[in-house]
Amino acid sequence: MKLFKQLFTLLAFAPLAAAAAGGAQVHLDKAPVNLSDKASLQRGAKMFVNYCLNCHSASYMRYSRLQDLGLTEEQIKDNLLFATEKPGETMTVAMNYKDAKVWFGAAPPDLSVIARSRSPDWLYTYLRSFYRDESRPTGWNNIAFDKVGMPHVLASLQGEQIAHFKKIKDHDGNEHEVFERFELVKPGSVTPAQYDAMTGDLVNYLAWMAEPVKVKRMQTGLMVLGFLAVFFVIAYYLKKEFWKDVH
């Protein structure tokens, strides 16, 4: 019983301990995820292939699966097939992981299910939170992922921004430096609103790629619930009819 109480206490306070160890939480912006918006998903797929697939793989996703987004096999071959010649191949990269670890400090993770691992809101915030930091090897840092090894591959679109921080005191009187705001010091090729829309499309695609059958699964689930609701009514009246002489 004593062991059980200790285990219960550990499980109950583990989330609080993890939060304390992780420090202050970053505010996450709501990602514009709409898995039924095929136009957005197609734009996101194009962004993913052009900007992410150079370093990151998506080894659980085949190019041919993009036909579920309304693309034809010819469109996939002409516009999205850069690393291979066969639409049935998975989205892999030619970069050697050992080289990547030397260049970036860690091998770029596979992005097949990154939206399920990190959440779309985190990804949306992360892609818009890069700022110039000359103390980092790449020259970039990120509010959502401090000391990130990844350079800002979308800098040509967003431009360059710097982060402003302010000092606050906690309940114990200790000073902490917290993020206050971004300042765009060098505009990119698109406006901030356009960049937000483009990263929104990319995150929308990443969320779809993490579970391509989610929309169909939810539709099937609603159909099953509807069937069970109708069947319950029928079963109820059948039960009343069969048991009327007993009651």
Image (spheres, grey):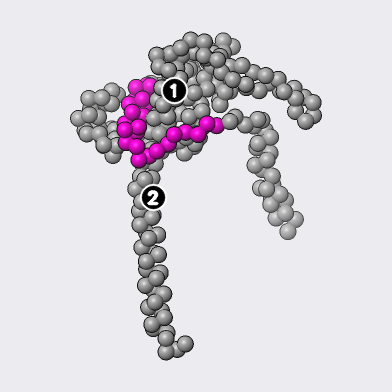
Determine which residue is flagged by label 1. 193
Q: Residue furthest right?
A: 172
Determine which residue is flagged by label 2. 218
- Helix, strand or loop under label 2: helix
Q: Is residue 47 above or below residue 66?
A: above
Count of all numbered marks drawn on residues in the image? 2
Work out how far the residue at label 2 is from the one at label 1, CA to CA, in angstroms: 31 Å
What residue span does the magenta drawing correspond to? 28-54
Indicate which disc residue 11 carries: none
Would you say residue 20 is visible in this rendering? yes
Q: Residue at x 40, y 69 (%)?
A: 232
The picture quadrant where one finds residue 153 is: top left
Q: Residue at x 40, y 17 (%)?
A: 190
Would you say residue 149 is visible in this rendering? no
Q: Earlier in the sequence, mark 2 or mark 1?
A: 1
Left or right, 11 with respect to 37, comes to right
Residue 158 in the image: state x and y as whole percent. 45, 17
Is 52 one of the magenta-colored residues?
A: yes
**Quadrant position of the N terminus in the picture:** bottom right
Q: Nearer the viewer, residue 110 or 115?
A: 115
Q: Nearer the viewer, residue 69 or 188?
A: 188
Q: Residue furthest left?
A: 74
